[in-house]
Image: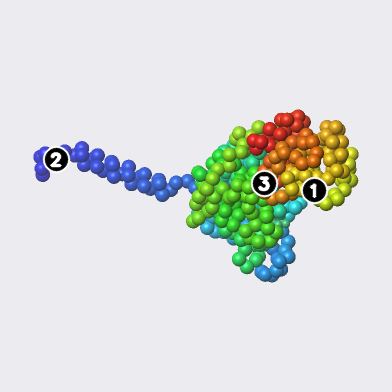
Amino acid sequence: MNKNHNPKPMLKYLMATLILFASLLSFGQTQKPVIAILATGGTIAGSAQSSVQASYNPGILSVEQIISSVPAVNEIATLEAIQVCNISSQNMEEQIWLQLWKTIDSLFANKLCDGVVITHGTDTMEETAYFLNLTVRHPNPVVLTGSMRPASALSADGPFNLYNAVALASSKEAYGKGVMVAMNDLFFCANDVTKSHTTNTAAFTCPNYGPLGQMRDGKPSFFRENLFIHTTRSQFELKGVDKLPGTEILYAYAFASDLPFYSLIEQGTKGIVIAGAGHGNYNRPFATAMEHASKKGIVVVRSTRIPSGGVDKAAEEYNSIFPVSYNKNPQKARILLMLALTQTKDTKKIQEFFEKY
Ligand code: ASP
């Protein structure tokens, strides 16, 4: 035996090897993110009589059935399934929005999950997304997804959309990015995303700003960031709110009647968004009705039925005393107006909201 043998370096070597081994082991066991799947129905939960039929019934499958069609999703996250409702999204209700908000707020506030994925019908998905984008005041990812083909279809698009939505909600890159919609390999910000095709699987676009990014191999790659105010910086507070101010949309078109306008004024509507022609334009009967509404304390906002370009303060023909929606389409403008009306009726302040959110 070598008398000069010193056990210390050997011990150090052993310890270092153990630490390395232990850290490699614990690296292998990194906890998967916990993602709550909040199912609301839609075509992703839909079923048809045959795999090639165009008509089908949305809102048939349960959240567990939807998840079981995508086994790979369990490799990226630990899932908590919650069935919020099972409806087609054209039947979305204010009370379901408030319930969704409450559920998400309490999941994040109590640290019960890292992110949320909402399965939703595609018809009003953009509206639910924008409502939550303005009201969920947490940085954790919230991603909505759905499908254009029912679960029973050949090449159903729901399973991959769900996989991508869970992967996006599980990623650290999605933190603080606002509520997003993941469809057809792309993901979009809630303030601009819109359904722009009635049947194609590539149904969603951001007509003004383009998609936020795309999913590849279960990883998001961001192209840009949503710089409008959302989530953690939003000033809209829903705690204690159990009813939102009644706010409607009126569509402008050639010789549009003002009858619906007066009927809304009569029934006590608090806010009206005009889906104007072109750059937020409308006819003479609308102009008179808008002034009348405004005198009655109803806030009227000029938006446009044109998919991109938005409406700014420049106006043709009539004096522009009404707030404008900028790039918010009428259905998004209605949501922002509804939330703004929970705080103020001051049209200057409401105009500022449209500039920032
Ligand atoms: N009408 C369906 C819905 O919005 C369409 C879909 O999900 O794609 O629920």
Give the distance between the C-alpha atoms of the residues marked 2 and 1, in whole angstroms: 91 Å
Q: Is residue 298 left or right of residue 18?
A: right
Q: Which of marks 1 and 3 is in front?
A: 3
Callout 3: few (<14), some (14-19), or many (20+) C-alpha neighbours within 10 Å?
some
Give the distance between the C-alpha atoms of the residues marked 1 and 3, in whole angstroms: 17 Å
Residue where numbered disc 1 is placed: 251
Task: Say which element carries label 1.
Answer: strand
User: What x and y, as percent, mark residue 122?
Assistant: 68, 54
Residue where numbered disc 2 is placed: 5
Give the distance between the C-alpha atoms of the residues marked 3 and 2, in whole angstroms: 80 Å
Looking at the image, which is closer to me, 211 or 48?
211
Mark 3 vs 2: CB contact within 8 A: no
Looking at the image, which is closer to me, 345 or 171?
345
Callout 1: few (<14), some (14-19), or many (20+) C-alpha neighbours within 10 Å?
some
Looking at the image, which is closer to me, 287 or 270?
287
Quarter of the image holding residue 174? top right
Task: Say which element carries label 2.
Answer: loop
Mark found first going from the N terminus, 2 or 1:
2
Q: Can residue 94 be seen in this view?
A: no
Task: Say which element carries label 3.
Answer: loop
Residue drawn 72% across the image and 39% down it: 314
Q: What residue type is labelled 1?
A: Tyr
Q: Can residue 281 be seen in this view?
A: yes
Mark found first going from the N terminus, 1 or 3:
1
Q: Quadrant of ligand 1?
A: bottom right
Residue drawn 21% across the image and 42% down it: 10
Quarter of the rendering occupied by the N terminus: top left
User: What x and y, as percent, mark residue 151?
Assistant: 65, 62
Q: Which amino acid does label 2 sit on?
A: His
Callout 2: few (<14), some (14-19), or many (20+) C-alpha neighbours within 10 Å?
few
